[in-house]
Image: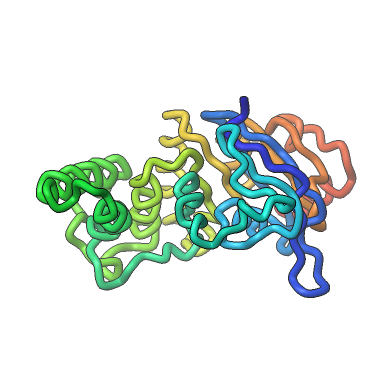
Amino acid sequence: MPILQVENIHKSFGSTEVLRGVGFTLERGEVLSMIGSSGSGKTTLLRCLNFLETPDTGRIIVNGEPLFDAKDPATHREADKRKKRLHFGLVFQNFNLFPQYTALKNVTLAKELLAKEQPDYRQNKTAILKKIKYEAAALLNQVGLSDKMENYPHELSGGQQQRVAIARALALNPDILCFDEPTSALDPEISGEVLVAIKDLANRHITMVIVTHEMGFAREISNRVIFLSDGLIAEEGSPEEIFGAPKTERLAAFLRAVR
């Protein structure tokens, strides 16, 4: 069974139809890259998956459980959205770190807030917070920031901030890790360190959906690539098929333009 099933997603903003019936599946441990021109619907699709936008039609199923079904009002409840988002970790292109907190606190904060809702929190507060801090430190070490845990975002480079954001997304153990143009806000010489961190996740078979403009990176890291155009999946295939043998002139023209 696929870990993620996306079926017939439509999304409009006013009279502008951004997604026009997008569907795909994702297997556990797979890396899926989404490519396409600006305005093709990539980020909107990612935001629908993370319940930051509500699709107009379609279904989103994770581990066989329908998290969203446009025809089932029971799946539309606002109160359930936070729980549904826990299935997905999202790394934004502009980091979105809390400037008033250290790198370590940025990583622990969400898990600490969730822990407070547990019935045994008061009795085991010290042990729970110690465990959360230990796990967060291990994640920061994993992304090469063991010496920056007490630094604030303004004391970190863009690449370091993005790696903190990756650690933060991993802290809640999501089923699927999503990246929205993870290097677009970085200088080229800095973006490499973020790409290395993502490659390490791929090597550890973390399930990922990556919206990217880095064609070489997508070709190297992906198991499958989706080419979005005008709100539709125009082509889908292996990196070799997408980059080496495009079937449509639309994809071929896109690849010529970005090379």
Q: In the image as oriented, which residue stretches furthest toward the right? A: 249
Residue 212 position (above or below residue 150) = above
1 horizontally vs 130: left or right: right
Task: Give the quarter of the image for residue 23.
Answer: top right
Q: Quadrant of residue 37?
A: bottom right
Rendered location of residue 26, percent (x, y): 62, 34
Give the residue displayed 79% in from the left and 46% down from the top. 233
Q: Position of residue 39 (x, y in %)?
A: 73, 64
Q: Is residue 129 left or right of residue 99?
A: left
- Horizontal and vertical percent for residue 257? 76, 55
Residue at point 54% right, 60% down? 184
Q: Can you say whether 92 is above or below 226 in the image?
A: below
Label total for image: 0
Residue in front for this viewpoint, 214 or 106: 106
Q: Which residue appears at 47% of the width and 54% of the height?
A: 91
Q: Residue at x 89, y 46 (%)?
A: 249
Q: Is residue 108 at least partly visible in the picture?
A: no
Lateral position of residue 220 relative to residue 258, left or right: left
Q: Quadrant of the N terminus?
A: top right
Is residue 176 in view? Answer: yes
Q: Nearer the viewer, residue 100 or 71?
A: 71
Residue 193 place in picture, x, y as percent? 40, 48
Q: Nearer the viewer, residue 25 or 156?
A: 25
Q: Residue furthest top?
A: 1
Colouring rule applied to residues: rainbow
